[in-house]
Image (spheres, rainbow, N blue to C red):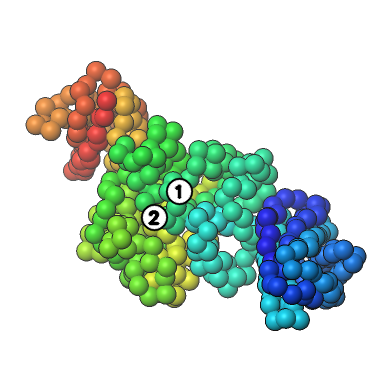
Amino acid sequence: MTTSDEYFFGESTNTANYTAYVKNTGLLTDTYNISLDYEGPGGWTNTFTTLNGTFNLGETDTVTVNPGDSISVEVNVNANSINGYGKTDAKFYSLNGSFGIVNFKFTTFGLDILVVDDDDGMDYEKYIVQELVTLGSDYGVVPSDLVPPNTNSLNTFNTFVWNTALTEPGLSTDEVNSIKTFLDNGGNLYLNGVDLAYQLADPTSPFYSTETNNFFTDYLHSSYILREHSATIAVGIDGDPITDSLTMMRLVGGTGANTINPTDGHYVNQIEAVGLYNANILSLWLKPDDHPAIRAFHGLHGKIVFTAFGFETIALDDVRSLFAERVITWLSIPVGIEETDPIRPEAFNLFQNYPNPFNPSTIIKYAVPEESMVSIKVFDLIGREVATLVDEVKQSGAYELKFNAEKYASGVYIYQMISGNFSQVRKMSLLK
């Protein structure tokens, strides 16, 4: 039994139509019993049609097929205006002992969570789906190629969980544009995948472009540091709403999919959160300043969690469950509720510039907790001052500035913020 189309993605007022084929590949005429199994919302109706007529869920039809011939089975699923995610199996068994089954999946618009299956047919989405089932989440699953044609309906969902696993490239141009539209309209995103940071933000990647780098910095709010990090264990960060008390997250072995595997050349990418109120959420083993995951805010309402490894590679069931629960919970909290005072910073901070590398300009953000004299200057690697960006009294608040390096040569530069006893230094790369 074969099929040409196994997914439907659309309004719950629509009827999904699928076609399956039963072919007799034997040498003798055979008789087949055909029926449906269904798992999904109550109130949906399922029927199938053969040359003998139309049959309901729970009924069986019998057809006879000559050697080399085939028959079609039309399967119809009607959601009857009930939003949800359902799976219908068309199955047969023959009097000569053969059997077969094909799966049809129906996801309506208007659910809480949309799982985007972008793992190149590897079925890794089952790891996050298992956790969503345990959490009792209202979710659906679609392959990534169904997302761009439905961009105008994506914000009927609150959250995307987008899994790219080992796919190269992890995101197409059309998929990037759909995610940007979703986030700009207040959607939430958990994006995860192997080498995804490298693909989007490393100029040596064959998939890199100005557009992918802008997406990485302006939408994922991340800075790319390193492709091949040697660590295969991550640890939580104290006080973080997602990873506090998460003492060890193994990324190889266990019951995970082992999509992080240095032996096969699949490493964790090192990234850094950029922007005010955005944060690193994991550190790498014995490297507290090296990070593979961030959480960020986008616009007035959107949130992002980005892990530079696939969710499916988390090795232990209990860690995978805890992380999924924390990610989904954090994304579901409306922006502003969990922050005590997003306007008044609690400490001085100089953030990593973005984009980085840049040409010719970049954004530098900094935080001032109280009225203070603030200095921010740029130096070359031998310590010569090349620019003064800030040199004045600042009130308490969050600030950002644009540094235009059009007149400077390519290279690494240091920028330093000084205010009273506070001093912080970061590096940025000008790449012309």
- Give the residue at the far left of this rendering: 382
Q: Is residue 162 visible?
A: no
Residue that badge 1 annotates: 170
Q: Which badge, 2 or 1, is on the more N-terminal residue?
A: 1
Q: Position of residue 74 (x, y in %)?
A: 80, 60
The numbered dot on residue 194 is 2
Looking at the picture, does residue 237 appear above or below residue 271? below
Where does the image place residue 314, in percent across and percent down from the top left?
Answer: 40, 67
Q: Residue at x 84, y 74 (%)?
A: 62
Count neighbours of disc 1 (C-alpha within 10 A) and say few if under 14, some if 14 to 19, many if 20 or more.
many
Quadrant the N terminus occupies: bottom right
The amino acid on which the numbered mark 2 sits, given as a three-letter code, is Val
Residue drawn at point x = 62 percent, y = 65 percent: 137
73 on left or right of 399: right
Name the image quarter holding residue 375: top left
Is 245 situated left or right of 428 in this image?
right
- Please state which amino acid type lies under the numbered disc 1: Gly
Q: What residue occupies the far front of the structure in this picture?
A: 27
Dot 2, crowdedness within 10 Å: few (<14), some or many (≥20)? many
Quadrant of the snapshot with the C terminus: top left
Label of residue 268 in the image? none
Q: Residue at x 45, y 52 (%)?
A: 167
Distance between the alpha carbons at the discs numbered 2 and 1 = 8 Å
The reply to whether dot 2 and dot 1 touch (C-beta < 8 Å) is: yes
Residue 150 horizontal side relative to residue 179, left or right = right
Tell me where residue 71 appears, x and y as whole percent: 78, 63
